Structure formats: structure tokens, C-alpha cells
Image (cartoon, helix red, strand yellow):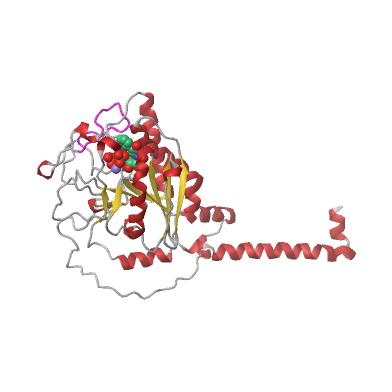
Amino acid sequence: MTVEIYLDKKNCWKTKPFILCVLLLCSIFWHTLRHNRLDTNAPLFCNFQRSIIGINNASHLGLLKGVTLHRMLYDTPNIMRPLRIDVLTMTPWFAPIVWNGTYNSDILNAQFHQKDVHVGLTVFAIRKYAVFVQTFIETAEKFFMVGQKVTYYIFTDRINDIPAFTLSDGRKLIVLEVPSYTRWQDVSMRRMEMIRDQSRQRFIREVDYLVCVDVDMRFSDEVGVEILSGIFGTLHPGFYSASREQFTYERRPQSTAYIPTDEGDFYYAGGFFGGTVEEVYRLTNFCHNAMMVDKEKQIEAIWHDESYLNKYFLYEKPTKILSPEYLWDNNFQTPGFLKRKRFVAVPKNHNAIRYRRELMGVSVASGKFHR
Ligand code: 5GW
Ligand code: MN
């Protein structure tokens, strides 16, 4: 029947609007493709881009928009003048280590603004740790990614204890209700699983980068886009001067977190890592799966999620590393090279809040720390 209608010249006028509509839709689709964010380097769009190319079997280079150049004014870098000579600023695999004085925020902010980057900050406030949320968010509003698009994700079992906040423009806060585990070790470790699950369900659609941190902290100086990279970790403030044998890696070969004494780059802190949503998904998925393998074998790594994180970063090297400026604890004496304390542990009333590290004997003697 349909064929007959198409062949029927008298009825031809009936099919014309239909064909015009199809052509219109095609051109709208094409226009959207060309002017969508295909010209950015935003990692989230790369897969989309590739799948489109797969369908068309044509090079995506033809879809790129012309570049607009923006004039910028700043001090010239000087090849003969290193920005820091007292600390390591680059790893042997060419990942920058972020210290005060090594970057120019104006350049970086302009770059990230052009890409319209959206950052998610994840934090867990389970049980009594809900008390830390207020200071955490209030100080983040002052210092964290000022001027960028930010979404705070608060994972909690106590949604009614999370206060209301007035946030600056471009910022929002989402409370995610999650179960509370009985053992504190599980509260800490299950963060990996929950970040992984939400990366798949939500973060991948809502943000470009994730920053995953402890909640018992306050921001006391700028933490901006200089931290962002494919996948980044933070040097633990207790181990910057320790040798690789002294790192408190998991040392039992039966554990998936095992690292032998002749391996290791740095000791990374469990309380500050991040990257693109894809990379954070890979990291958290690895750590959670490794924990589940150990759980089957009834073994748990010595420093819980931190041990699995260190295992991951040994073989999947971070593309950027944050100096201890980004995760400081005032229980440690301030070394001369530490110019800023950007994100600092809030002292815990250990009896009221918890009872943990003291058992392991943290000491601050002679600038070296042993657990
Ligand atoms: C409670 C008791 C012992 C250890 C951890 C907890 C605990 C941690 C908790 O009851 N509720 C909770 O939300 N957490 C989350 O895990 C917080 O986001 C916290 O910042 C993170 C890591 O635990 P911390 O901060 O006690 O670990 P350290 O190594 O910074 O002392
Ligand atoms: Mn903490």
C-alpha cells in the first residue's frame, strides 16, 4: 500500500512534507553535532565522539571547530630559574607534583573556564561524622574551586542532620542517603564501592572531574583547578621524608594490597584523590574488587582503603600528585618547605568521635612519623 501511494503522482503532495521533515531533522542533528562540545578536550565527550565516528566511518577532525585565541597577560617563565629548588616538582614519569609557586592560577583558571569544567566533590558523613559537614562546606565555599562549577555530594545515613547552606553561584549540594556499616573499617572502605556505583549512575552524567576527600577537614587556603588531572593522588603528610621500606604499605603477600619492600614511589593518603569520572571509576572499581577478594580470604589490608589505593597508584601511576599542602595535619611539625596549608585535619575528640590511630601509636618525634 505504501509503495502505491509513493508511486501515485496525484498523491505525491502527501509525501513531500514527510520528506521535508526528515531532511529538517537530519540537518538539525548534523548542526547539533558540529556545534556540540566536540571541539573541547572534555574527556566525557571523547567516547561519544568516537562512537559517532564509528557510525559515520569518517574522521572526527572534520567536525572540529576553529580555534579562538585569547590574549593573556602574566609574568614570563624563565628557563634559567626553576620555580622550586627545595622540593621535587616532577615525578620520573613526568607527573607534576603540585606545590605553591609552581603554577599560575590565572592561566589554569582561564583554561578550565574555556572548557566549562564541572567538578564534583564527594564526602562521606556517616553517623557522628555528620558534625563535620558544616565547617567542611563553609570553608569549601571560601577556598575550593572558587569561580568554577561545583557540586558537593554528601553521602550520609543521617540526612536530617545535614544543615541547609547558602551556596555561591554555580554551586549546588546533593545529599545521597547510604547505609551505615557497623565496623568503622567498613565505613571507611565502602566509600570505594559507593563512589564507583555513583560514578556509573550519576557522576558520569553530571560532572567532568571528581575530588574525593575525608570530611573531618577544613579548607584554610586555595584549592583550585591546579589539582585536576586524569587521575591524581596526594602525598600523606606523615611520610614525605620516609624511605620506601618505611611506608606503611600492606606487607603480607596473601593480601591483594601487598607491596614488597623493594617497590614503591610515594605513600599516598586515603583522604584525597580524584580525576576524571572514568579514571576515578577505574580506581574505585579496582580497590573495591581487591577488598572483596581479600574479604573472601578473611584478610583486610593494614590501612584499609588507603592500602588498596597505594597498590593501585604503584602500578597505575597518577598523572598529577598533590603535595602535603593539600592534606595537612597540625599534629605534625611544620617543615620549612611547606608554604601553605590548604586543607587541614580538624582535631577529633577521639573518645567522642572515634578511637583508632592511637592504638597504632602515631608519633611525631623528630619529624618522622611511625604508626
Ligand atoms: C569512625 C570511627 C573510626 C574510623 C572512621 C570512622 C568514620 C569515618 C565514621 O564513623 N563516619 C564516617 O563518615 N567516616 C568517613 O571516613 C569520614 O568521611 C572520614 O573522614 C573518613 C575516614 O575516616 P577518618 O577521617 O576517621 O580517618 P583518618 O585516617 O583521617 O583518621
Ligand atoms: Mn580523616
- Residues 43 and 136: in front is 136
For the point 50% across and 65% down, the residue is: 64
For the point 52% across and 54% down, the residue is: 48
In the image: residue 202, left or right of residue 10: left
Q: Which image quadrant shows ligand 1? A: top left
Image coords of residue 70 (percent x, y): 39, 74
Q: Is residue 37 above or below residue 370?
A: below
- Residues 186 and 192: in front is 186
Image coords of residue 49 (percent x, y): 52, 56
Magenta segment: does it hold 192?
no
Image coords of residue 100 (percent x, y): 23, 60
Q: Is residue 306 visible?
A: no
Q: Is residue 319 visible?
A: yes
- Residues 347 and 227: in front is 347
Q: Is residue 52 above or below residue 296?
A: below
The residue positioned farthest toward the left in the image shown = 366
The magenta segment is 247-262
The residue positioned farthest toward the right in the image shown = 10
In the image: residue 257, left or right of residue 191: left
For the point 19% across and 54% down, the residue is: 88
Magenta segment: does it hold 257?
yes
Image coords of residue 351 (percent x, y): 26, 35
Prevailing SS of the magenta stretch: loop
The image quarter containing residue 271 is top left
In the image: residue 10, left or right of residue 239: right
For the point 49% across and 53% down, the residue is: 206
In the image: residue 309, left or right of residue 277: left
Q: Locate the C terminus by quadrant.
A: top left
Q: Is residue 119 above or below residue 156?
A: below
